[in-house]
Amino acid sequence: MNLANNLEKSAFFFPERPAVCENDRVTTYQQLNEKSNRIATALIKMDVKPGDFIGLLAPNSMDWIAFYFGVLKAGAVAITFSSLLRGDELSLLVGHSKPKIVFTYDDKLDELLRLKDSIGLEKVISPNGDLSLPRMIETGSPHFKAIERDR
């Protein structure tokens, strides 16, 4: 059974029960399911196909969980990288897994952009771009410019 199916069933049977708690924030199963649906929709509109590898290099958070389920709902494979990875370790793991897109946060953006060409990464998306993971969760919109800074 697919984990995304489990989320959908939980949202159906227990919509108002807490699914995730982070500090003083609580997300219900229904809210988590809706957020993950918006992510899946945006990924599909971004031409993510079933079986594509989609990476997330960010600290654990509610958005991380919604991202994970959204990737599964899009039929893609979620690859999660520890936010503690640096240098050669990051290059090795991202290069080996070959994600089509990596969502990251500002602290890791420059490092990923330096590695982008050498590891064959198509897109790097971060909060400073026109699309951030939280904005994608809220809108389900794929309209963005992935950050492609020239050095």
Image (cartoon, helix red, strand yellow):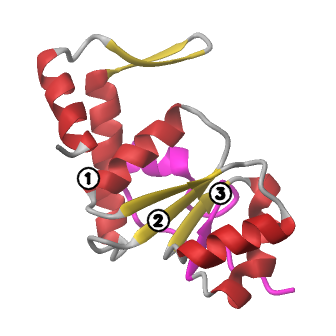
- Residue at 12% across, 17% down: 13
Q: Amino acid at mark 1?
A: Lys
Q: Position of residue 84 (x, y in %)?
A: 78, 48
* Residue numbers of the magenta segment: 122-151
Q: In the rendered view of the protein, which quadrant contains the C terminus?
A: bottom right
Residue tagged 2: 54
- Mark 1 or mark 2: whose residue is earlier in sequence: 2
Q: CA distance from mark 3 to mark 2?
A: 11 Å
Residue at left offset 61%, top offset 36%: 60
SS class, disc 1? helix
In the picture, the disc for residue 73 is 1
Q: Is residue 78 magenta?
A: no
Give the alpha-carbon distance from disc 1 to disc 2, as whole Å.
Answer: 12 Å
User: Quarter of the image holding residue 132?
Assistant: bottom right
Residue 112 in the image, given as x and y percentages of width and height: 74, 71
The label on residue 104 is 3
Q: Which mark is residue 4?
A: none
Which amino acid is tagged 3? Thr
Q: Quadrant of the N terminus?
A: top left
Image height check: is 135 above or below 22?
Answer: below
Give the number of the mark in front: 3 or 2. 2
- Residue type at tag 2: Ile
Is any part of residue 39 visible from this angle?
no
Front position in the image: 61 or 38:
61
How many neighbours does mark 3 have within 10 angstroms: few (below 14), some (14-19), or many (20 or more)? many
The answer to whether residue 105 is left or right of residue 74 is right
Please tell me which of labels 3 and 1 falls first in the chain: 1
Q: Give the SS element for disc 2.
A: strand
Estimate how packed mark 2 is, as few (under 14), some (14 to 19) or many (20 or more) residues with alpha carbons within 10 Å. many
